[in-house]
Image (cartoon, helix red, strand yellow):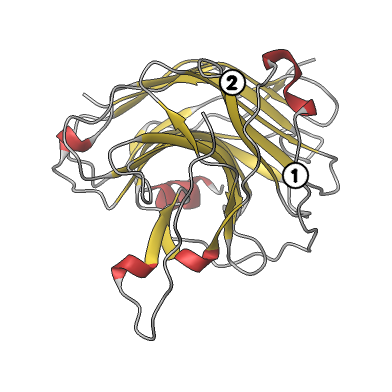
Amino acid sequence: MTDTNRTGTDARLDRRSYLKAIGAGSALSFGSGVAGATASTTDYIYVPHGKRVRKENVIAHEGPNRDVSPGDVATTRTQSETVTTQKRPVVPDVHQWLAYTYAAYNSNDGNGFKRYQGYFVVPESPPVSGNVNFLFPAFQDENDTTIVQPVLQWNWGSYTDRWTYAAWWGPDSSGAYHHGPVMAADPGDALFGYMNVDNSNGGQWYIELQNQTKGTSSDIDTDYLTLDFTHAFTTLEVAGYNWGGCDQLPGYTTFYQQSYENFAGQGVTVNWSEIVNSNAQCNVNPEVSSSSKTTIYTS
């Protein structure tokens, strides 16, 4: 038996308005800045949840580099996270999601998504430096307060004009965001993303992104989250977006061989909607080929 999700309509809306309308190598080091008495823009860093936060609210969980087995993703955990109770923080400003696909979980079991896996390839680098770009599949809870995501990132943090990747989640009960080891990537590298949660009554999500070309990976366990994750996305987020800076966008990205499961172990067929930010001035276009394949075009 295959579950289905409801279908939205194509629109040029910002993400918050759209969801409201429908009711719905070796690890790379990152030097954290120390905030002074008066905060400046250098005291903040972008996170792949549509906003900037103070650098001390981005927590790195570094681990040893290791070879990975693509057929045995779920056994590669190496970290033990502190378990806390998740509180729902204020919904962040999400206007920087430039183009994305969205699907809502709509099944009688009511517990949301349990598992994701899928592939994408590191796209061509932006011709001109400037933007911070994030590309990722993701799950969020019904109020879009918390996100789990394997993320490819361009020009992020101290990695100027470079592709890197990491497993991310957040915010936690204190408002902090967490990421696994930051790893190097290059255009053409094949990436495999995986997300899985323990049980339907809340638990720890395990998030991993593998670079199958380089044989490296980044992974992380979340805190104990008492949330059902009912929203799925594939996303191009552009932080600090220059609305006319089309040459600062990467090449197109296809998310393919994506599969979703519920807590009964059944495959879930997602019915995607294609969304473009209403402020976009560049020719960006999310396109749905099937439940398992979506593409975000940037030219």
| Residue 246 position in % (x across, y down) | 17, 35
At which x and y percent is residue 189? 44, 18
Residue at 65 percent of width and 22 percent of height: 67
Q: Which residue appears at 65% of the width and 42% of the height?
A: 63
Which label belongs to residue 118? 2
Q: Earlier in the sequence, mark 1 or mark 2?
A: 1
Residue 249 percent across, percent down from the top left:
24, 34
Residue 11 found in image quarter: top left
The amino acid type of the residue labelled 2 equals: Gly
Label 1 packing within 10 angstroms: few (<14), some (14-19), many (20+): some
The quadrant of the image that shows the C terminus is top left
Q: Front-most of 110 and 151?
A: 151
Query: 2 or 211, which is in the foreground?
Result: 211
Q: What mark, if any, has residue 79 been given in the picture?
A: 1
Local crowd size for mark 2, using a 10 Å CA cut-off: few (<14), some (14–19), many (≥20): some
Q: Residue at x 20, y 29 (%)?
A: 283
* Closer to the eye: label 1 or 2: 1
Image vertical order of residue 34 relative to residue 269, above or below = below
Near-viewer residue (235 or 142): 235
Quarter of the view holding residue 208: top right
Regarding mark 2 in the picture, which secondary structure is present there?
strand
Camera sees residue 58:
yes
Direction from residue 147 to residue 165 in the image, left or right? left
State the SS at label 1: loop
Amino acid at pointer 1: Gln
Residue at left 34%, top 49%? 96
Disc 1 from disc 2: Cα separation:
22 Å
